[in-house]
Image (cartoon, rainbow, N blue to C red):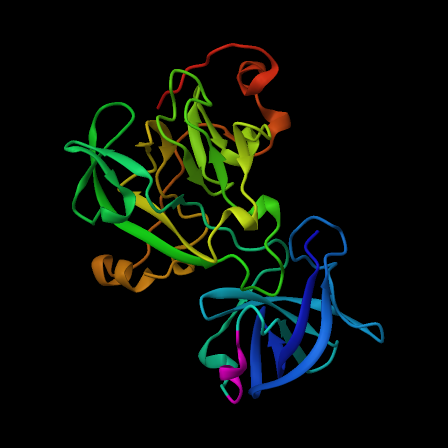
Amino acid sequence: MANFAANRILTFNGETSGGNLTAVGNFGDSGFTSTVIDTNMDGNIDAVDTWGSAAFQIDYSGYTIRLNGDDYAVFFNGGAGYYIPYNSNETDLSGFDGVDPDTIGFTATPNDAVVVNCFLTGTLIATPDGERAIETLEPGAHVTLADGTAATIRWVARQTMRADAVNLSIPANRLPVRIEAGALGNGLPHTDLTLTADHALVMDGLLVNASALVNGSTIRFLTADDMPREFTYWHVELDAHSAILANGLPAESFVDYTGRAAYDNHADYLALHGAERLIPEMPLPRISARRHLPAALRIQLGLEDTDFALSA
């Protein structure tokens, strides 16, 4: 359940036009005990979700705002009033009191939280000179692809997360997935691999999101208790969407579904390349739910002992 208990709110007046939310005036900060309600129990912030107290409930506005590195849901009263509930025991947003929200900006997010597709710090990426921790890679260096060829790194994306510092508790399906060493057969991965749920491995000619592989034992969602308060995700962008080797497993490189602006070092990308570019997804079917897994992969997840090929 993703209900969130708040004890303070940032408020502002605003108006929408052309799909954009614009503030009228500055943030005000005040104490207010309230709850964000995950109405449909899906662990996301959606159009059906609400915020309020026993006396009232108001709707999610369809917009989020990034404050202190985290995304917050914005709620509205059907008129000009907008509200950002938060818990000061987890993160203090009172410093935004008096700040013009338009200097930060809002993101239209009608349904579902924004999710980045990345590896956790310490993931080992194959390079022509051997494996290197992902956080040590730099643009211009080379990685070894699953087919044995080398590719040049264009950018290494970085985003730091605070697991308990948003006003909608991070549900299990938004936390990382951990694949234990050897869980996929043939000794792979060679070391526990931790990555976001929507990050795909390249398996049997398919792009298989990590969440689709979860079996509750050797492949599982991590909980908030498993994670430090602050942790960092990384992603490697190449010239093309490709299969790199992460802890020995073929895994996808960056593809711009989430948008580079979601990362902390987006400015570095613009400084390097000047402008955004589109990266077409490699021509493989993507599996995002376990029910879509082919029988051979279901078997490998624990129904019986069978191996399957990991390939680019």
Q: Position of residue 148 (x, y in %)?
A: 23, 23
Left or right: where does residue 258 sit relative to residue 296? Answer: left
Q: Position of residue 16 (x, y in %)?
A: 62, 75
Above or below: residue 195 compared with residue 69: above
Quadrant for the C terminus, please. Answer: top left
Q: Which residues are magenta?
A: 92-98
The quadrant where residue 269 appears: bottom left
Q: Position of residue 200 (x, y in %)?
A: 45, 34
Judged from this view, the residue extending furthest toward the left is 129
Is residue 121 highlighted in magenta? no
Left or right: where does residue 290 sit relative to residue 140? Answer: right
Above or below: residue 269 compared with residue 150: below
Left or right: where does residue 53 sit relative to residue 139? Answer: right
Above or below: residue 31 compared with residue 220: below
Q: Residue at x 54, y 29 (%)?
A: 213
Nearest the viewer among 129 and 269 is 129
Nearest the viewer among 7 and 278 is 7
Nearest the viewer among 112 and 70 is 70
Q: Position of residue 75 (x, y in %)?
A: 67, 71
> Can residue 73 be spotted in the picture?
yes
